């Protein structure tokens, strides 16, 4: 019998026992054995649990939690042959939304994880300030306004409002002074500007379904970069209009595409990976790992 592992973030579950019953019921219905259930901890958000699951020889590892849980599990699974199943339980659910999976129906999500099609998607890999460790991101990494927004969002408010809580934090962060950034593609001309944010996307979709990078794709073997540098109210208005209408890039919103990028800021700046703040950094080196992650998506297995 096939067996799945569930890497669950208990802080994201209103009723862990009831959630577990739903997952086990769906597994039994489809002839899978009782899943291996492993909770995350504050010290280990999912990586150690994913390694434990692989050591047990499971056929599928499901991340049950928010974007941080998904990223931690995917970082271990990337490059291997065991697929990732998404059981969204957070606020953003960025990868699930990018894959057009329903984030609000646990039973349907388990059904899809067990019976859906296995697809290969790219992952981004990021190294900060010359560190030896390279971290995976699935949807978007960023430096500046986006990271300041994530770190400034009140968790209690996020629990009540959902993703609109980020809007309130973003409005506060927008009052910041920005920074000067050199954005250097592996091949091409370096862009040097005073910016509010630099975002490196494997997918281009933000909270609320907004497409910041309309040409980005999870399986094109490329990263897409947005250099956000509005000046004054008119610049912000033009930038917002460009994003909402999926318009072409301009001076306020430059878009780049390539397999690897280096971003150098003139001062330590807030940085995030898939919505998780990772501190302040001056230099980011990013590259794409084409087709590195297997993930369950809608559709019948081939």
Image (cartoon, rainbow, N blue to C red):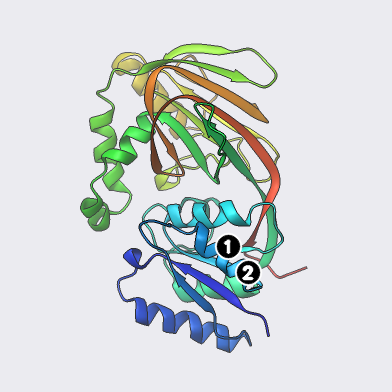
Quadrant occupied by the N terminus: bottom right
Mark 2 — residue?
A: 55
Q: Residue at x 55, y 85 (%)?
A: 34
Using residue 279 as the reference point, say whether residue 134 is left or right of it: right
Location of residue 108 in the rendering, given as x and y in whole percent from the top left corner: 51, 73
Furthest residue toward right:
302
Q: Residue at x 58, y 71 (%)?
A: 112
Using residue 106 as the reference point, say whether residue 262 is left or right of it: right
Q: For mark 2, does the 10 Å Cα neighbourhood hold few (<14), some (14 to 19), or many (20 or more) residues?
A: few
Location of residue 60 in the rendering, given as x and y in whole percent from the top left corner: 62, 70
Which of 253/156 is in front? 156
Location of residue 8 in the rendering, given as x and y in whole percent from the top left corner: 44, 68
Location of residue 233 in the rendering, given as x and y in whole percent from the top left corner: 29, 18
Q: Secondary structure at mark 1?
A: helix
Q: For mark 1, does the 10 Å Cα neighbourhood hold few (<14), some (14 to 19), or many (20 or more) residues?
A: some
Q: Secondary structure at mark 2?
A: helix
Does residue 173 sit above or below 17 in this rendering?
above
Furthest residue toward front:
132
Q: Residue at x 73, y 70 (%)?
A: 301
Which of 90/126 is in front? 126
Q: Pointer 2 and pointer 1: residues touching (CB < 8 Å)?
A: yes
Does residue 83 sit above or below 194 in this rendering?
below
Which of 215/4 is in front? 4
Which of 94/182 is in front? 182
Mark number, residue 51:
1
Quadrant occupied by the C terminus: bottom right
Q: Quadrant of residue 213?
A: top right
């Amino acid at each position: 019998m096939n067996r799945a592992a569930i890497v669950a973030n208990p802080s994201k579950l209103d009723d862990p026992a009831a959630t577990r019953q739903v997952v086990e019921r769906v597994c039994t219905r489809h002839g899978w054995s009782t899943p291996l259930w492993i909770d995350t901890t504050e010290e280990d958000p999912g990586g150690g649990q994913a390694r434990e699951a692989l050591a047990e020889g499971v056929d599928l590892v499901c991340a049950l939690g928010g974007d941080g849980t998904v990223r931690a599990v995917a970082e271990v699974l990337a490059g291997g042959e065991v697929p990732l199943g998404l059981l969204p339980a957070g606020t953003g659910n960025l990868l699930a939304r990018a894959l057009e999976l329903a984030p609000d129906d646990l039973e349907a999500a388990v059904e899809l994880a067990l019976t859906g099609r296995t697809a290969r998607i790219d992952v981004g890999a990021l190294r900060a300030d010359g560190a030896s460790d390279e971290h995976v991101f699935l949807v978007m990494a960023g430096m500046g306004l986006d990271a300041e927004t994530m770190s400034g969002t009140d968790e209690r408010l996020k629990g009540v409002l959902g993703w609109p809580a980020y809007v309130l934090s973003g409005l506060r962060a927008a009052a910041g002074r920005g920074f000067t950034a050199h954005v250097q593609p592996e091949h091409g001309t370096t862009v040097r500007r005073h910016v509010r944010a630099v975002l490196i996307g494997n997918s281009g979709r933000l909270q609320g379904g907004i497409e910041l990078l309309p040409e980005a794709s999870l399986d094109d073997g490329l990263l897409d970069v947005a250099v956000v540098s509005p000046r004054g109210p008119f610049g912000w208005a033009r930038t917002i209009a460009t994003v909402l209408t999926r318009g072409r890039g301009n001076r306020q919103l430059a878009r780049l595409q390539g397999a690897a990028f280096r971003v150098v800021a003139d001062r330590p700046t807030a940085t995030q990976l898939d919505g998780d703040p990772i501190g302040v950094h001056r230099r980011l080196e990013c590259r794409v790992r084409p087709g590195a992650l297997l993930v369950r998506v809608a559709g019948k297995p081939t």
